[in-house]
Each structure stands twice: as C-alpha cells, then as structure tokens.
Image: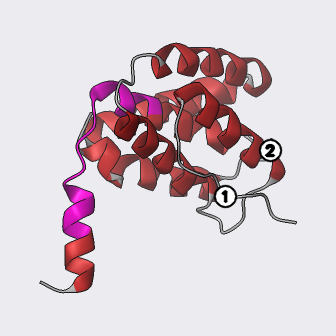
Amino acid sequence: MGFFDSIKSKLNSIVVGTAAGEWAVTAMAVMVFADGEVEAVEIEKAKVVATTNPVVKNSIGSERGGLLFAETVEAIGVAPSAMVQTYLTKLDVLARKVSTQDDKNFALAGVIAVATADGDVERPEYELLLRFKALLGATIDVPGPKA
C-alpha cells in the first residue's frame, strides 16, 4: 500500500456521530453565504465536499448529505441575511449534540475544506470559522484570512 493509499484509507475510516455529520453539512452550506457573494461554482465545490467528505459519508451518508446541503442552500438563498441567522441558531443547537472532541474537530475540518476550496479564506469566512470553532468547542486551528 502506497503513502497516498494509506492516507486515503485512514480518511475513509473516520467515523463520527450523526449530529457531527448534520452539523458539518449545514455549516458547509452556511459558509457558502459567508462573504455575501454566492457563485454557482462556489456552491458546486461546497456540494462536492458535502457529499464526499469522510465526516459526511461515514455519518449521515453522501445521499443524505447532498439532500441536506441542497435544502439548506435553497432555504438560505430565499432571504440570505435573515436565513443565515436562522441557520446559525440551528447550528448552535445542533453543536450541543456533537459529543466527542474528535467529532467536533472533524466536523469543523469539513467546513474548513469548503472555506479553503477557492484557495483563499476571506475575512467574513474566517470570522465565521472562528464562530463555528467556538460553537463546537473545537480545538483545531482555523486558517487565517488572506491579507
């Protein structure tokens, strides 16, 4: 087994609770709206992460992850400023159900993958990542914003 096969195997063996998977997918969808400029390509990149990320695949499954992501993006898209706040409240409640430190860290890592998918973390994305980290009580670092 090669080095990359070993890493892939380890990633695919990540198993987290259902709450962590639901939290991660919902937070990924909210992250798309963080900077106020939502582009179809950004939504598509986030959707790929939401359906292929091991945190999601091994907790709620890719199909459920894709449906939850699409429903959340659609709901927020109706009235972004109001709905983002609604989903932040929902994420706060859901974060309390994410029990283990590993689940918290893996859930946040999935959202970081969405925030960094375009190469840069914008200031609003960074601030949202910090908020998510605090909500979860995660212990991993978040990438800083671009200068």
Q: Which residue lies furthest to the bottom in this view?
A: 2
Q: Which residue lies furthest to the right in this view?
A: 147
Report, in whole angstroms, how far the alpha carbon at label 2 lies from the one at label 1: 12 Å
The structure residue drawn at horizontal position 61% and vertical position 20%, both measured from the top left corner, is 87
Residue under pointer 2:
124
Residue range corresponding to the magenta coloring: 8-23
Residue 33 in view, yes or no: no
The structure residue drawn at horizontal position 43% and vertical position 35%, both measured from the top left corner, is 104
Q: Quadrant of residue 134?
A: top right
Q: Position of residue 123 (x, y in %)?
A: 82, 50
Q: Which amino acid does label 1 sit on?
A: Pro
Q: Quadrant of residue 132?
A: top right
For the residues bearing labels 2 and 1, Cβ distance under 8 angstroms: no
Residue in the foreground of this view, choosing between 58 and 66:
58
Residue 24 belongs to magenta span: no
Residue under pointer 1:
143
Q: What residue type is labelled 2?
A: Pro
Left or right side of 138 for 54: left
Residue 9 belongs to magenta span: yes
Left or right side of 2 for 40: right
Q: Which of marks 2 and 1 is nearer the N terminus?
A: 2
Q: How crowded is mark 2: few (under 14 residues within 10 Å), some or many (20 or more)?
A: some
Rendered view: 84 above or below 45: above
Q: Where is residue 95 in the image (x, y as percent from the top left)?
A: 48, 22
What secondary structure do most residues of the magenta stretch adopt? helix
Left or right side of 137 for 103: left
